[in-house]
Amino acid sequence: MTRLLIIGPPGSGKGTQAVHIARHFRIPTVSTGEIFRTNVSQETPLGLEAAKYLDDGAFVPDQLTNALVKDRLLDADLQPGFLLDGYPRTAPQVMELDNMLASRGHRLDAVVELRAPDSELEQRMLQRAKEQGRKDDTIEVFRRRLDLYHRETHEVVAVYSGRGMVVSVDGSGDPGAITTRAIAAVEKFLGVTP
Ligand code: ADP
């Protein structure tokens, strides 16, 4: 049973790495960004509400995000474990997740922090904008998201660092090499012998 969280700045390849790491540990990923984007494209009530924030590169309000995750964590497919991608992202969300997990006698096993220099993140984002055309991939929105990451999410990493749960991974360079590094680091941390 493995419960993981992956944190990384926009453009760090967090979503891609999440998929590979989760596959390795045979657990599903829960990506709040993905869930929001799906709802936006399907124009659900949640999507209509979330779109205002996503398009601006702002965080969706905690209340909405927490309720969404709380619901999702009850699903049967997540009982054997999961990899959270993009949640928690603020200090209040950390507390909420603590409560959600504790109420079922669970806790996170490790937090993977992807690190990469801002200049590389910006380059990658511009590339992704060309390839995928995500609406929040403009330079202005990207800078806002990066700034928000540094201001808010930094605190999340600090909380988990204080608990000795953070596995920092160099997120620059080749995506395949990053996956290998990340998996090796998590297994070492969890005491899994390959
Ligand atoms: P990235 O990591 O590239 O910023 P994500 O796919 O994780 O992208 O998130 C995209 C957007 O979805 C965020 O900019 C934000 O608007 C919203 N979002 C995702 N997760 C959260 C969260 N935990 N709290 C608030 N907003 C969120």
Image (cartoon, grey):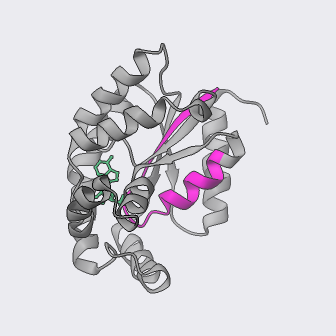
Residue reaching furthest to the right = 194
Q: Is residue 54 left or right of residue 5?
A: left
Q: Quadrant of the N terminus?
A: top right
Q: Quadrant of the C terminus?
A: top right
User: Which corner quadrant of the image does residue 92 belong to?
Assistant: top left
User: Which corner quadrant of the image does residue 118 belong to?
Assistant: bottom left
Q: Residue at x 56, y 36 (%)?
A: 82
**Above/below status of 111 relative to 52:** above
Q: Nearer the viewer, residue 116 or 103?
A: 103
For residue 59: magenta?
Answer: no
Q: Residue at x 71, y 45 (%)?
A: 24
Residue 67 in the image, given as x and y percentages of width and height: 31, 36
Q: Is residue 158 left or right of residue 190?
A: left
For residue 14: magenta?
Answer: yes
Q: Nearer the viewer, residue 49 or 113?
A: 49
Q: Quarter of the picture for ligand 1?
A: bottom left
Residue 63 in the image, given as x and y percentages of width and height: 22, 38
Residue 79 in the image, given as x and y percentages of width and height: 59, 27
Which segment did they paint magenta? 1-22
Q: Residue at x 21, y 59 (%)?
A: 58
Q: Nearer the viewer, residue 162 or 141?
A: 141
**Above/below status of 111 relative to 124:** above
Q: Residue at x 65, y 54 (%)?
A: 20
Residue reaching furthest to the bottom = 130
Residue 98 in the image, given as x and y percentages of width and height: 36, 24
Q: Is residue 129 left or right of residue 91?
A: right
Numbered label tally: 0
**Above/below status of 138 relative to 163:** below
